[in-house]
Amino acid sequence: MESTSNHGGIQQLLAAEHEAQQIVNAARTAKMARLKQAKEEAETEVAEHKTTTEHGFQRKLEETSGDSGANVKRLEQETDAKIEQLKNEASRISTDVVEMLLKHVTTVKN
């Protein structure tokens, strides 16, 4: 009778071990599926971020290089205005400068 109960206990242990193995296998399969899903989600997120960053870069590039002609024209206008201002200032004070130079050149100091 003891042999029958030992045999029944062994069968229970084998059944429990088999059930535990199935649970472990199911958990492993679920883990692998979740890792695969996480990897796919991460790749999608990286691709979206890359696309967004690239679009932003292209937009900035267009903003800065697209207006280079306008920037050159604006700088030329500012330069021309500054040159004209300097010419006007020079012509305004040129007589005073000539008088000052003549005064210093013609003054004799002992």
Image (tube, rainbow, N blue to C red):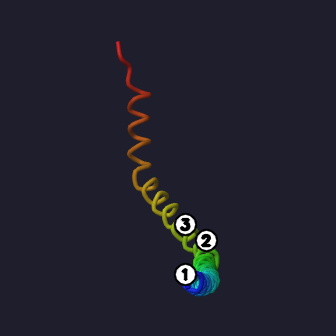
Mark 3 neighbour density, 10 Å: few (under 14) some (14–19) many (20 or more): few
Residue 90: x percent and y percent? 45, 53
Establish if 98 lies above or below 39.
above
Establish if 71 lies above or below 95.
below
Pointer 1 residue: 2
Mark 1 neighbour density, 10 Å: few (under 14) some (14–19) many (20 or more): few
Establish if 105 lies above or below 75.
above
Point out the residue furthest to the top here. Answer: 110
Residue 22: x percent and y percent? 61, 87
Of badges 2 and 1, the one in the foreground is 1
Amino acid type of disc 3? Asp
Pointer 2 residue: 72
Disc with the residue nearer the chain's start (2 vs 3): 2
Amino acid type of disc 2? Val
Which of the pair 69/49 is nearer the observer? 49
Which of the pair 71/92 is nearer the observer? 71
Amino acid type of disc 1? Glu
Pointer 3 residue: 80
The residue at the point 63 percent across, 83 percent down is: 25
Which of the pair 110/53 is nearer the observer? 53
Q: Quadrant of the N terminus?
A: bottom right
